[in-house]
Image (cartoon, grey):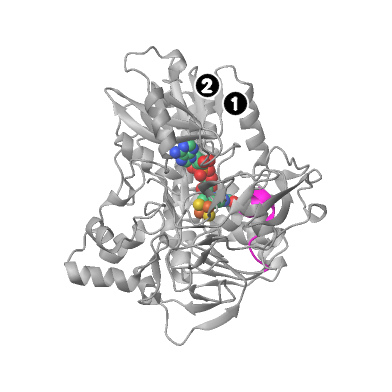
C-alpha cells in the first residue's frame, strides 16, 4: 500500500475518535472517517487512481484543491464531481468515469 | 452603511473581513470551501475536531481569533460553501454570481451580490512544470500533499520525493514527515548562487519578517532531525512506473534550470510532490477588469485598491509573499474598502507590516523564479496538457504546421488547454513554450464548470436590474 491515513491514535493533532463511514467504489466497500473527502478516503485506503482518461491512462489526485479536474468521479449517479473537494457521506456510491462532460 | 463583500477566507480575506467590520461596514465573507482558513490554515473539518490542531500550523491562535471575531460580529455574514462562479460588470459596480452548496453538487442554490465594495482574496495555486511521467498516479503537486496532510492526515505515499522550487517545499516535507512518511529528498531547482542572491542580500531587511524566517527555520530543523537531504540545483526530470510512480529520475540543473547531461540518477519512490511556484487565481480579477502586472499579479496601490474603482485585492493574488503578507494586505484592503482611514494608527501598522512582507516576495522570485532551461527535460511524448493529453511533440508540430506562436490558436489546433481545467495547469507552460506573453490564458468567463441544470435555475432566479438590495444580497 502506498498512500495511507495516519491512524487517529498516532495522530499528533489528537482528533476526536473517528466516526467511520463506508462508501462503495466500483462496487467494493471502502472505509474512511467522517469529514474526509472522497479523494482522502480513497488515498487513505491505498487507492491512488480512480479515473480513466480518453487515452486509457489512470488518474487520481494531482492538485488536491479543486483546480486540475484530474480527480473527477461519479458520485451517486452524478458525474464530474471533484473527489478532492467533496466530503464523503456514508453510503456514497462512487464510480469510475472516463472523460468529462462538464460545460466549461 | 457600506456593503463590503470579501471573496476568499484565507489569511488575506479573513483579515480584510475583520478590518472592514471594524471600520463600520456590513460585511459578507464568501468562500467555496466549507471551512475558513484558506490554504494556509487548512485543518480537520468540524466533524473531526482535534485537541491539538495547531501542531501542523503556524499562528493557529491568530486564525482562532480571526474566525471567532468574524463569527460573532453582528455586521458580518460568513458564507462557506459559496462558490463565486462568475462576475459581471455593471454600471458603476459588479455583480457576483454564487452557488451555495456541496462542491459540484446538483441543485445548489443561487445567490447574487452587488456590493458597494469588493475585496478579492482568492489566493493562488501551485504550478507544476511538466516532465515525462508527471501524469502517473502518485505524482502530485506539493500543494496536494500539503492539503491532504493538513486537512485529513493522509500521506500521499510512504517513500516520497519533494521537488520543484521555493520555500513552500519545506513545510510540505515537514507535513509529510509528521504524517509518518519517509521523505527521500527535497530537490530545489534554484542553485546555491541564486538562493544566496535572493535570501542573503540585505539581510537586515529580513529581520522585519522574523515570523516567516523563524517558521522556515523550524521546517529546516524538522528535515535535519529526520536526516532528509535538501539538494539545491536539482530537479525531478522524469517519473517512472507501471500505472503508478515507482521511481523518479533526479538530475542536476545549470543556472538556467537546464538538466546537466550525465548527472541523472534514479531514485526509488512511491510518490513525488512537485511544484515550481504559485500562480494567482485571477478569474474574478480579470472579469472585473483589474489591471495585471507583467508578472501576472493584480496591480494594487498603497491602499490595496485595484485599477477598478470599488475593487480591492489582497494576498497571493497580488504577489507571493506568504501568510504574513496576506494578513497585512487584507487588513489594509478591508479598511480601505469600508471607507475607513488607512492613515489611522492601526491601519498604519498594517501598512508597515505589509511593506516589510512584500520584500519577501521579491526574494522568493530572485531565489526560486522559474529558469527557461527547464524545457531541456521535455521529450516529444511528454504530456503537456493533462486534461487533453496533448504532448510536447504535438504542440511543436502544430507550431510548425501553422507557423503560429499565439497561444489561442495553438490551443484550438492542438487541443492543449481546452479540457475541464480550462488551462489552469498548462496555460502558463504553453505560453512559455510559445514565447507568448499575453495573459489571455487566465481569462475564463466561468470560474468553475457549471451544470446545465444550474444554469437553467439561475436564469429563472435572475434578479431584475431595478430590484432593491436588501443587504446587497438577493436570492
Ligand atoms: C494547496 C496549498 C497549500 C498551501 N499550504 C501552505 C502552507 O502550509 N504554508 C505556507 O506558508 N503557505 C502555504 N500555501 C501558500 C498559501 O497560498 C499562502 O501562504 C496563503 O494561504 C495565502 O493566503 P491568501 O489569503 O492569499 O489565499 P488562500 O489561503 O489561498 O485563500 C484563498 C481562498 O479563496 C477561496 N476562493 C478562491 N476563488 C474563489 C471563488 N471563485 N469563490 C469562492 N471562494 C474562492 C479559496 O477557496 C480559498 O479558501 C499553500 C498554497 C496551496 C495552494
Ligand atoms: S485533484 Fe485537482 S481537482 Fe481534485
Residue appearing at x 53%, y 49% in the figure: A82
Question: Disc number at residue B322?
Answer: none
Residue B153 falls inside the magenta stretch: yes
| Secondary structure type for disc 1 | helix
Q: Mark 2 points at which residue?
A: B21
Residue B160 versus residue B259: which sits nearer the camera?
A: B160
Q: In the figure, B231 relative to B32: above or below?
A: below
Q: Indicate the chain on which mark 2 is placed.
A: B
Residue at point 61%, 63% (across, down): A48
Q: Name the residue under label 1.
A: B70
Compared to B190, does B59 lie above or below?
above
The residue sitting at 73% across, 42% down in the picture is B48
Residue B213 pos. (x, y %): 58, 53
- Give the residues drawn in magenta, as a range: B148-158
Q: Where B114 falls versus B354 (above or below)?
A: above
The answer to whether the residue labelled 1 contacts the one labelled 2, judged by CB atoms less than 8 Å apart, is: yes
**Residue B85 location, x and y as percent?**
42, 37
Mark pair 1, 2: CA separation: 8 Å
Q: In this view, does A82 lie to the left or right of B221?
A: left
Q: Position of residue B283 (x, y in %)?
A: 37, 42
Q: Left or right: B422 with respect to B63?
A: left
The N terminus of chain A lies in quadrant: bottom right
How many tags in the picture? 2
Amino acid at each position: 500500500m502506498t498512500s495511507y491515513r495516519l491512524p487517529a491514535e498516532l495522530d499528533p493533532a489528537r482528533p476526536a475518535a473517528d466516526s467511520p463511514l463506508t462508501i462503495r467504489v466500483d462496487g467494493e466497500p471502502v472505509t474512511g472517517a467522517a469529514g474526509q473527502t472522497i479523494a482522502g478516503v480513497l488515498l487513505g485506503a491505498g487507492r491512488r487512481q480512480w479515473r480513466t482518461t480518453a487515452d486509457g491512462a489512470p488518474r487520481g489526485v494531482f492538485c488536491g484543491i479543486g483546480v486540475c479536474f484530474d480527480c473527477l468521479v461519479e458520485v451517486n449517479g452524478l458525474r464530474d464531481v471533484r473527489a478532492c473537494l467533496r466530503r464523503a457521506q456514508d453510503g456514497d456510491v462512487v464510480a469510475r468515469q472516463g472523460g468529462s462532460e462538464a460545460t466549461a | 452603511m457600506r456593503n463590503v463583500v470579501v471573496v476568499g477566507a484565507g489569511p488575506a480575506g479573513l483579515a480584510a473581513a475583520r478590518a472592514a467590520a471594524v471600520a463600520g461596514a456590513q460585511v459578507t465573507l464568501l468562500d467555496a470551501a466549507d471551512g475558513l482558513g484558506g490554504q494556509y490554515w487548512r485543518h480537520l473539518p468540524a466533524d473531526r475536531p482535534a485537541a491539538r490542531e495547531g501542531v501542523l500550523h503556524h499562528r493557529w491562535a491568530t486564525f482562532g481569533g480571526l474566525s471567532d471575531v468574524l463569527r460573532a460580529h453582528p455586521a458580518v455574514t460568513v458564507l462557506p460553501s459559496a462558490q463565486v462562479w462568475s462576475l459581471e460588470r455593471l454600471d458603476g459596480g459588479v455583480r457576483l454570481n454564487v452557488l451555495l452548496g456541496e462542491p459540484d453538487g446538483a441543485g445548489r442554490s443561487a445567490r447574487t451580490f452587488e456590493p458597494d465594495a469588493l475585496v478579492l482574496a482568492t489566493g493562488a495555486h501551485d504550478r507544476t512544470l511538466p516532465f515525462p511521467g508527471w501524469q502517473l498516479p502518485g505524482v502530485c503537486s506539493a500543494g496536494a500533499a500539503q492539503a491532504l496532510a493538513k486537512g485529513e492526515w493522509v500521506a500521499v505515499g510512504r517513500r516520497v520525493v519533494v521537488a520543484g522550487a521555493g520555500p513552500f517545499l519545506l513545510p510540505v516535507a515537514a507535513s509529510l514527515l509528521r504524517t509518518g512518511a519517509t521523505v527521500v529528498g527535497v530537490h530545489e531547482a534554484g542553485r546555491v548562487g541564486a538562493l544566496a542572491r535572493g535570501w542573503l542580500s540585505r539581510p537586515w531587511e529580513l529581520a522585519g519578517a522574523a515570523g516567516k524566517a523563524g517558521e522556515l527555520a523550524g521546517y529546516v530543523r524538522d528535515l535535519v532531525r529526520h536526516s532528509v537531504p535538501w539538494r539545491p540545483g536539482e530537479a525531478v526530470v522524469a517519473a517512472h512506473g507501471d500505472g503508478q510512480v515507482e521511481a523518479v529520475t533526479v538530475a542536476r540543473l545549470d543556472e538556467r534550470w537546464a538538466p546537466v547531461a550525465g548527472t541523472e540518477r534514479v531514485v526509488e519512490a512511491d510518490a513525488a510532490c512537485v511544484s515550481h511556484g504559485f500562480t494567482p487565481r485571477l478569474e474574478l480579477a480579470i472579469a472585473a477588469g483589474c489591471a495585471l502586472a507583467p508578472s501576472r499579479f493584480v496591480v494594487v496601490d498603497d491602499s490595496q485598491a485595484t485599477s477598478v474603482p470599488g475593487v480591492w485585492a489582497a494576498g497571493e493574488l497580488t504577489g507571493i509573499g506568504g501568510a504574513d503578507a496576506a494578513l497585512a494586505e487584507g487588513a489594509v484592503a478591508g479598511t480601505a474598502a469600508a471607507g475607513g482611514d488607512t492613515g489611522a494608527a492601526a491601519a498604519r501598522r498594517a501598512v508597515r507590516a505589509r511593506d516589510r512582507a512584500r520584500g519577501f516576495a521579491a526574494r522568493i522570485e530572485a531565489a526560486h523564479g522559474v529558469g527557461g532551461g527547464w524545457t531541456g527535460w521535455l521529450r516529444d511524448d511528454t504530456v503537456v496538457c493533462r486534461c487533453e493529453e496533448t504532448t510536447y511533440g504535438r504542440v511543436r508540430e502544430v507550431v510548425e504546421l501553422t507557423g503560429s506562436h499565439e497561444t489561442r490558436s495553438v490551443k484550438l489546433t492542438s487541443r492543449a488547454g481546452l479540457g475541464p481545467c480550462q488551462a489552469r495547469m498548462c496555460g502558463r507552460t504553453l505560453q512559455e513554450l510559445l514565447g507568448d506573453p499575453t495573459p489571455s490564458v487566465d481569462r475564463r468567463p466561468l470560474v468553475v464548470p457549471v451544470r446545465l441544470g444550474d444554469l437553467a435555475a439561475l436564469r429563472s432566479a435572475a434578479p431584475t436590474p431595478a430590484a432593491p438590495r436588501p443587504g446587497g444580497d438577493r436570492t
